[in-house]
Image (tube, rainbow, N blue to C red):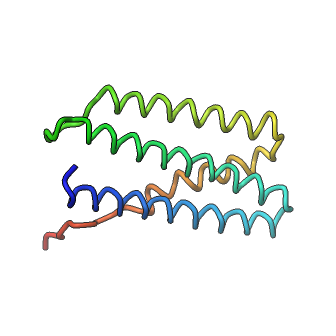
Amino acid sequence: MEPAVNNAFSHTLRKILMVQAGLVVATAVVLALVKNHEYFLATLYGGAVIIVSTSYFGWRLKIATQSADNKPAVNTVELFKGIFIRFLLVIVLLALGLGWLKLEPAGVLSGFIVAQLAFWFSRSSYGMTRRK
């Protein structure tokens, strides 16, 4: 990956992760005030599932673009492997939180959904110019 592309990628990933963490913590605090502390922990857990998933997929995407032999392409096998493992990771972590840890389902789903919404709120314009 070229240095400029790598900087843009890292900047975008950091921005998404910061927005996810901020939205999840804010939602957890609101639910803790409205409901109880069980919702706080469950919301943090649900958000953490997506934050871990985003971090993992960002790492896999970086690998997929680096292993394309410096061509302007993406190694699709690595990319699909990352997508598949990310999907499994989310399922396993949600099952762990809801089943074994017995966290409040509404709290887990709230954190999960809010963290997903962060993708919409964190659109990055790093290195881009706007047309007038």
18 versus 96 height, above or below:
below
Looking at the image, residue 2 sits to the left or right of residue 37; the answer is left
Residue ID at (63%, 53%) = 47
Farthest bottom residue?
A: 132
Compared to 62, does 32 lie above or below? below
Identify which residue, 122 or 35, lies in the foreground.
122
Pick whichever, 64 or 19, lies toward us: 64
Quadrant of the frame with the C terminus: bottom left
Above/below status of 29 relative to 62: below
Camera-side residue of 87 and 117:
87
Task: Identify which residue is drawn at 35% across, 59% down.
Answer: 10
Q: Position of residue 116 (x, y in %)?
A: 53, 51
Residue 72 figure quarter: top left
Q: Could you say where residue 7 lies in the image, as x and y percent from the top left? A: 28, 61
Judged left or right of residue 125, residue 132 is left
x, y percentage for residue 89? 58, 34
Q: Is residue 90 left or right of residue 66?
A: right
- Residue found at x 37% / y 61%: 123
Residue 87 location in percent, x, y? 52, 32
Which residue is depicted at the point 76% across and 63% down? 31
Count all numbered tags in the image, as a single digit: 0
Can you tell which quarter of the image residue 95 is in? top right
